[in-house]
Structure formats: structure tokens, C-alpha cells
Image (tube, helix red, strand yellow):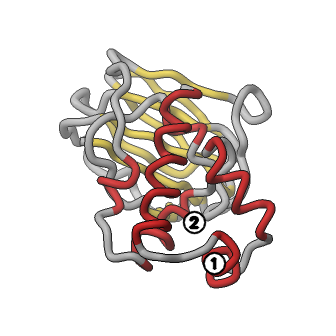
Amino acid sequence: MEEKLKELAARVRELREVCDYTPEQLAKELGIDVDTYLGYEKDGYNIPINIIFQIANKFGVDFNELLSGESGKLDTYQVVRAGRGITADRYPGYHFKDLAYRYAHKVMQPLIVTLDPSEAPADLVSHSGQEFNLVLEGRMKLTFDNTEIVLNEGDSVYFNPTYLHGQSCVGDEPATFLTVIAE
């Protein structure tokens, strides 16, 4: 994982240099401390997804190209509980380091989804790639290959979406989650 993050940091640094920006200029435009930005360029370890988006958009490059790397494929799913090897900051500060080793090829733009408790569960679907869900607020249920997994706020799940799957709200409060799909 460290190597992939260093590769991301090198791509970000190279893009900044090619576009003739100093670290100080870019940090100021991104609205972050220069030392924090220099840390991102050094090893990529804590670089938030929203900063990667801003850099890609600022310099007119494809987000997927800036982010791309290789990793293993998921056969089924893995649930990561809050506080156990994951940085569950509120979006858009969710850290790329927690996605980097899971995703290969193109990564679609993260999407924030809110599920209302009054809504009936959506039909189960399947699609190619890999999918990551992080519960930001409330509780949600992931139905996956005839298995139901209840996720609390801060929990996340990585899974192979070629299996039939769907998400629904658990409880009386809406559930909001971040979803990222890699092709």
C-alpha cells in the first residue's frame, strides 16, 4: 500500500511542477496549510479525496488517471468496523489511504446517498467492478448474495458487486453513506 501512495504523491507532485505551481501557491489555492500539503506530496498517506478532486479539476486532468493503480480483486466482501484500521472522517475528508489498496483501474466519483426509513428497499442489482460503502450517518443494511449485513455509523464495507446487492435504511433515522465504485 505504501508504494501505491508514494506513486500517487509522485503523480501529484509532477502535475504541480508541470503546471508551474509552487507548493505554497497550490496550498493557498486549496485552502490548506503548506506543511500539510507538503506531507501529501511526500508520501500521499493522508491525502483526502476532495484534495485529489480539486487538484485534478484545477489542472484539467482526469481524476481516474491521477488516482489509478493496481490492487487485488475482491472475491466476496470485507467489513471494516469504525476505529479498526480505518480513518472514518466525514466526507470529503475521507482518506485515500483507506481506499488505495482495494481499487484498481478507474474509480468513479464518490457519491453520497441518503436512504429514508420510509422507503421500501430498492431492487437488488449487480454490476462489474468493486464497490466501497462508508456509513456517514445512521445505520444501513447491505444485502449481499443472500446475506444481510448491518453497518453502523463509521463502518465500511468493500465488496464484489457482481453479486446481487442492495442497501436499505435501518431504524427510524435516515442513513447516509458514501459509495465509490471501481471498474
In the displayed structure, 62 sits above or below 122; it is below
- Under circle 1, the secondary element is helix
Mark seen at residue 30: 1
* Quadrant occupied by the C terminus: top left
Q: Is residue 74 left or right of residue 49?
A: left
Q: Position of residue 133 (x, y in %)?
A: 49, 44
The answer to whether residue 118 is seen in the rendering is no
Disc 1 and disc 2: Cα gap in Å?
7 Å
Type of amino acid at the residue the image marks with label 1 = Leu
Please say if the residues under marks 1 and 2 sit with CB atoms less than 8 Å apart.
Answer: yes
Q: Is residue 130 left or right of residue 118?
A: left
Q: Position of residue 135 (x, y in %)?
A: 61, 49
Residue drawn where x is 29% and y is 64% of the image: 62
**Residue occupied by mark 2:** 51
Residue drawn where x is 54% and y is 48% of the image: 9
Viewer-nearest residue: 125 or 19: 19
Type of amino acid at the residue the image marks with label 2 = Ile
Residue furthest to the bottom: 29
Viewer-nearest residue: 3 or 183: 3
Q: Position of residue 110 (x, y in %)?
A: 43, 59
Q: Earlier in the sequence, mark 1 or mark 2?
A: 1
Counting other residues with Cα less than 10 Å from the Cα at mark 1, is it few (<14), some (14-19), or many (20 or more)? some
Residue drawn where x is 34% and y is 46% of the image: 181
Residue drawn where x is 39% and y is 35% of the image: 103
